[in-house]
């Protein structure tokens, strides 16, 4: 098993599956709380700490975060601002016009590296992929691509697990067509030729960022958006960011239900573009560095390394590259969650959503009792609402997890979890 740092003991008290924003924040929370020590904590992620998130930011050309600077992986919400001041980088905090300043990507990642170094998170990292999870009477057994180990508690922070949305017509493209989803690991904007003709399917923040980043003299960039571009500052109304009344109303509905899913879907401003992304896109369109086709793609063919896109408005375009910026799929379908939803011991609901305890984020077993598995991130959105996948969602999840483990885990000791609702 590939373990970075100096750890030699394989078993752990708490293991975090996923080293992204949620996983690193959970680790910081746990270590700062004193509930676990370094030799009792593991982070399992084949991409390293924040590796996948960093890659996705580079792939879509993200320059500034949508979230304000107080949304950080550190427990202190003002540490990123202090870091910017102490390093003379306050010019990398950009005004949002409606709330706290937003950090540019380089500032955010430099700060996260500092936080990770402060808590020595690299020493906790197992750079492997978790392939299976089995809850046993003594804890949770984790299978990885290079072995297995046991843990008393498991925190799942795996995001969307590689699930992506593609239009139906994309199925007709051959496997060697020069077309790919923006989030596919092999997509690298730097490999696109300086005079290439590039098509981007989508009209949301990812498509807008990518189009603006790719725009340059001599290169033809075209966005294919089905609807007019919609500008929204946040992913949902700000009331959801407080995790109070709106979330309470959500949790009044049956757990893991279609009703909860509909509320969250309706609350999210999916497919929108924030002002700080829309403004440079509008300028690029104005100087004809980016073309915008408000139309639906009806057909796409590929031959000889060229893609021909035919739209419902009757126009056709010949492209050297086609990128799908069409969003993520369901977090319950792919990767580890796709396997766990079939386990008879863990309860699932509408479209495979995990049945979570609203107060603790622990995954309920089929008999209603609470398992030793916590869930954070996109898969917890039926508990925390539309901001569950975001940095602020990680902070709320971290508070709930630590509160629950404060009862269950003492410093250096493992304590068996309590039963729920009287179930032993």
Image: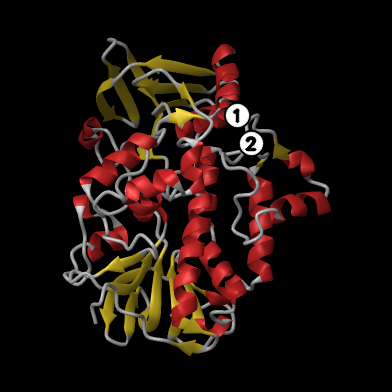
Q: Which mark is residue 392?
A: none
Residue situated in front as seen by the camera: 58 or 203: 203
Does residue 256 show up? yes
For the point 39% across and 82% down, which residue is it? 152
The quarter of the rendered structure image containing the N terminus is bottom left
Of 1 and 43, nearer the camera is 43
Q: Quadrant of residue 190?
A: top right
| Residue found at x 51% / y 63% | 399
How busy is the neighbourhood of tag 1: few (under 14 within 10 Å), some, or many (20 plus)?
Answer: some
Residue at coordinates 24% horizontally, 38% vertically from top-left? 174
Q: Quadrant of the C terminus?
A: bottom left
Label 2, on which residue?
99
Relative to 239, does residue 143 appear above or below in the rendering?
below
Tags 1 and 2 touching, CB below 8 Å: no
Compared to residue 49, the image places residue 305 above or below, namely above
Q: Position of residue 338 (x, y in %)?
A: 25, 59
Q: Is residue 378 above or below residue 99?
A: below
Observer-side mark, 1 or 2, equals 2
Q: Quadrant of the rendered structure where residue 216 is?
A: top right
Q: Nearer the viewer, residue 261 or 342?
A: 261
Residue topped by disc 1: 276
Question: Position of 264 compared to 23: left or right?
Answer: left
Question: In the image, residue 147 lies at what x, y percent?
Answer: 36, 81
Looking at the image, which residue sits at the far top? 314
Query: How many discs mark residues in the rendered view?
Result: 2
Residue 164 in percent (x, y) is at 33, 44
Q: Is residue 385 visible?
A: no
Is disc 2 placed on a helix, strand or loop?
loop
- From the viewer's perspective, is residue 25 above or below residue 290? below
Q: Position of residue 276 (x, y in %)?
A: 60, 29
Tell me if 271 is positioned left or right of 313 in this view: right
């Amino acid at each position: 098993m590939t373990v970075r740092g100096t750890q030699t003991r394989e078993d752990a008290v708490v293991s975090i599956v996923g080293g992204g924003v949620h996983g690193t924040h959970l680790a910081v929370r746990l270590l700062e709380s004193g509930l676990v020590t370094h030799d009792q904590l593991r982070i399992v992620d084949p991409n390293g700490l924040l590796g996948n998130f960093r890659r996705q930011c580079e792939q879509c050309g993200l320059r500034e975060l949508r979230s304000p600077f107080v949304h950080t992986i550190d427990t202190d919400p003002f540490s990123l601002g202090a870091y910017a001041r102490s390093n003379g980088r306050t010019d990398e905090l950009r005004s949002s016009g409606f709330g706290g300043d937003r950090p540019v990507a380089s500032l955010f990642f430099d700060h996260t590296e500092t936080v990770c170094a402060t808590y020595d998170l690299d020493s906790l990292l197992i750079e492997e992929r978790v392939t299976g999870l089995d809850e046993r009477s003594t804890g949770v057994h984790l299978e990885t691509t290079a072995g297995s180990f046991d843990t008393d508690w498991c925190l799942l922070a795996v995001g969307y697990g590689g699930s992506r949305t593609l239009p139906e017509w994309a199925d007709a493209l051959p496997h060697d067509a020069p077309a790919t989803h923006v989030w596919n690991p092999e997509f690298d904007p730097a490999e696109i030729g300086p005079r290439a003709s590039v098509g981007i399917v989508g009209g949301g923040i990812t498509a807008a960022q990518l189009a603006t980043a790719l725009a340059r003299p001599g290169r033809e960039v075209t966005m294919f958006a089905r609807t007019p571009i919609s500008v929204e500052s946040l992913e949902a109304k700000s009331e959801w960011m407080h995790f109070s009344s709106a979330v309470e109303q959500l949790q009044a509905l049956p757990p893991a239900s279609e009703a909860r899913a509909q509320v969250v879907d309706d609350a999210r401003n999916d497919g929108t573009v924030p002002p700080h992304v829309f403004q440079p896109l509008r300028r690029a369109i104005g100087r004809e560095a980016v073309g915008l086709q408000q139309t639906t793609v009806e057909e796409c063919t590929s031959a000889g390394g060229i893609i021909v896109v035919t739209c419902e408005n009757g126009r056709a375009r010949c492209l050297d590259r086609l990128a799908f910026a069409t969003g993520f799929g369901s977090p319950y379908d792919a990767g580890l969650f796709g396997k766990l939803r079939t386990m008879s011991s863990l309860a699932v609901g509408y479209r495979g959503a995990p049945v979570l305890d609203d107060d603790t984020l622990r995954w309920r077993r089929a008999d209603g009792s609470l398992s030793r598995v916590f869930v954070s991130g996109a898969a917890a959105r039926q508990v925390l609402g539309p901001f569950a996948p975001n940095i602020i969602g990680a902070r709320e999840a971290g508070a709930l997890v630590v509160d629950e483990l404060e009862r269950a885990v003492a410093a250096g000791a493992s304590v068996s979890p309590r039963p729920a609702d009287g179930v032993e």
